[in-house]
Image (cartoon, rainbow, N blue to C red):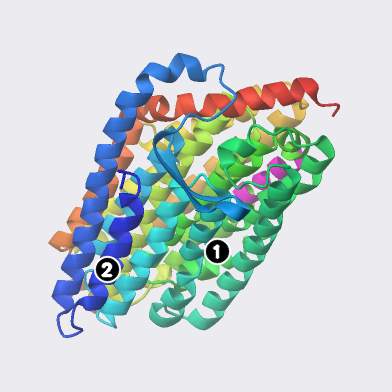
Amino acid sequence: MGLISWYVVIPAATAFAITLVPKAKPMAIRWVASTGGFLLVLLSAIVSVKYWNLAAADIELLRTSMFTKLYMVEQWTWFKSIGIEYFVGVDGISVLMLDLTAIIIFTGSLASWYVTERPKEFFALLYTLVTGVFGVFVSFDLFLFFVFYEVAVLPMYLLIGIWGTGPRNYSALKLTLMLLMGSAGLLVGILALYHGSGIHSFNLIELSKIHFPEAFQLWVFPIIFVGFGVLGAIFPLHTWSPDGHASAPTAVSMLHAGVLMKLGGYGCLRVAIYLMPEGAIYWAMFFMALATVNILYGSLGAIKQKDLKYFTAYSSVSHCGFVLFGLLALNLMGIKGAVIQMFSHGIMTGLFFGLIGMVYGRTHTRMIPEMGGLAKVMPWLASAFYIGGLASLGLPGLSGFIAESHVFLGGFFGNQWHDITLMRTLTILATLSIVVTAVYVLRGLATVFHSTITNPEFEKLTDATLPEKISTGVLIAALAIGGMLPWLFVDLIEGSIFPFLNRLHESGMISSL
């Protein structure tokens, strides 16, 4: 078994090991879960270094390549008669997403250290979910990709329905039904690619060697893009997201917003844009306009929220819009920004939801007007909240600035296929969200952590515990590294982006659009 398969084996084995621990030993359950998360972080560090060494020699080759170059590949036939393979590997984009997922599941396990209601089932389902997420990021067979995609989505129903708060049953059902609707469209698109290719294969690399007819791309591209876009909270199919965020327990919110929603943007790039570049060129401006609505609607919606989780959930809708906006710029700067934004927002929103869970566990309220002066009794949590907030509004020195500046520059530079005035107009509208974000973030944080303590019970609250400090400290470090050493991310992903651009340019030249 190769190195990449361990991304699936470790979380699956962790989930299984948790089921073997007696319910009467909750501390052992927490240690098994946290150890599994730590092993995944260690694995990601090893894979990142190995990828860096292997890919360094291929950067010039990739500048002109039409096909994704994979590393550490494992491939063998699964169902030969229908062309299904176990085909896993990584490129730079996959490696960054694997690093993100490992960090979030490790910190999420620590943030859930004090889960007392059925911790055994909770952590087992959590690691089952993350098995699917890792599987999506390493799969290059579309059937295998879809199977892992469903494994990542379906446990959310139980995790929210059992361990959630508020209208949890409504939120869990709404989330599940809307994501399954997207999955249905996605399945239609994958089967269309399978039959339309003429080679009857789900192999993503082999499918990329087929030039699908232009008419075929024009109807299949939007089906697949919307199928993934539902998970990426594309407007107007985003309504499941705020409710799901608000009702989910802490670690599930961290995974939901930090990683699960990134499957949407990743799938749009990896499958829709990569395999159907002519369809991408044709539909780009329509979906870019929707992404602009995402950005503005989410930020304006956040201003009106009184609940900390809804506040962060609407902010996530806005920031996920940046991912789609950057992808649809169809140029190097925009796509780089979108991929970095997936990582940056994943870490930032993971930090936010982790902190909200910690504050709620002490105050037993998420209502912003009911709080005040909490920085006096929990300085660590207040400082972490401010760092996350500053990353959200794009402060230089943190990863949010690197991601958003690339996205905006990509939109402003435009591309050779679309009207530059329209693209710049959409970009200017999107940049207005920076001002709105600054308003709601700074106002919200000032209300919660400053002024005077109005509830006498809050005077007795305690600051972060050791597991919570480790969890938040790791996430803050990731935000700072992304902002202070951006070349680490740029060098990691840039070579893997070139084949996407080369395919777009070739299709743009032969297309009659």
For the residue pair 23 and 417, the one nearer the viewer reads as 23
Q: Does residue 290 belong to the magenta stretch? A: yes
Q: Is residue 386 left or right of residue 174?
A: left
In this figure, which residue is indicated by the disc labeled 1? 241
- Please tell me which residue is depicted at 47% across the width and 57% down the height of the picture: 260
> Which of marks 2 and 1 precedes in the sequence?
2
> Which residue, as the protein is rendered here, is positioned at the far top?
60
In this figure, which residue is indicated by the disc labeled 2? 112
Q: Vertically, is 440 above or below 280?
A: below
User: Which span of residues is magenta-colored?
Assistant: 285-295
Q: Is residue 431 left or right of residue 44?
A: right
| Dot 1 amino acid type | Ser
Tags 1 and 2 touching, CB below 8 Å: no
Label 1 residue SS: helix
> Which residue, as the protein is rendered here, is positioned at the far bottom?
24
Q: Quadrant of residue 281?
A: top right
For the residue pair 288 and 270, the one nearer the viewer reads as 270
**Which quadrant of the figure contains the C terminus?**
top right
Q: Vertically, is 66 above or below 194?
A: above
